[in-house]
Image: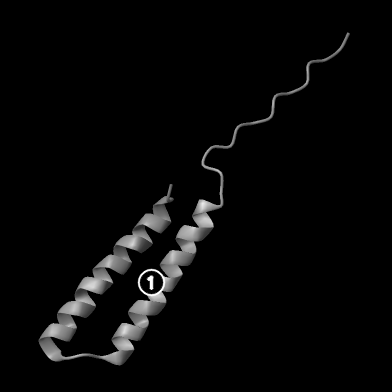
Amino acid sequence: MMSGPTKTMAAVTAAALVLTTAYTVALGSSGWLWFGWVILGVVTIGMAAADSGEPTVRRPRPRPKPQP
């Protein structure tokens, strides 16, 4: 499960892909623009991978019962 910041980063990456594609169709390809989008995608994948390694729910350890 992705955290809030990772979901936001994924949405920004998807929006950047749409904008980059629209720019390429309208005005022609720009290598630097695509390079920037690839870097953004790699960072997004890294954030998603880092999130997947964390436990989703942390349960506190039960306290030991005092012995009389």
In the rendered view, tell whether residue 38 sits above or below residue 31. above
Q: How many marks?
A: 1
Q: Position of residue 3 (x, y in %)?
A: 43, 50
Q: Is residue 13 left or right of residue 51?
A: left
Q: Position of residue 49 (x, y in %)?
A: 50, 59
Q: Residue furthest top?
A: 68
Q: Residue at x 21, y 90 (%)?
A: 29
Q: Position of residue 37 (x, y in %)?
A: 33, 78
Q: Is residue 63 left or right of residue 4?
A: right
Q: Residue at x 18, y 85 (%)?
A: 24
In the rendered view, tell whether residue 12 sits above or below residue 7. below
Q: Residue at x 58, y 37 (%)?
A: 58
Please tell me how crowded label 1 is: few (under 14), some (14-19), or many (20+) other residues with Cα within 10 Å.
some
Q: Is residue 61 left or right of residue 53?
A: right
- Quarter of the rendering containing residue 35: bottom left
Kindly identify which residue carries mark 1: 41
Q: Residue at x 60, y 32 (%)?
A: 59
Residue kind at label 1, given as amino acid type: Gly
Look at the numbered disc 1 and give the secondary structure of its residue. Answer: helix
* Image quarter of the C terminus: top right
- Quarter of the rendering containing residue 5: bottom left
Q: Residue furthest left?
A: 26
Q: Position of residue 40 (x, y in %)?
A: 39, 74
Image color mode: one colour
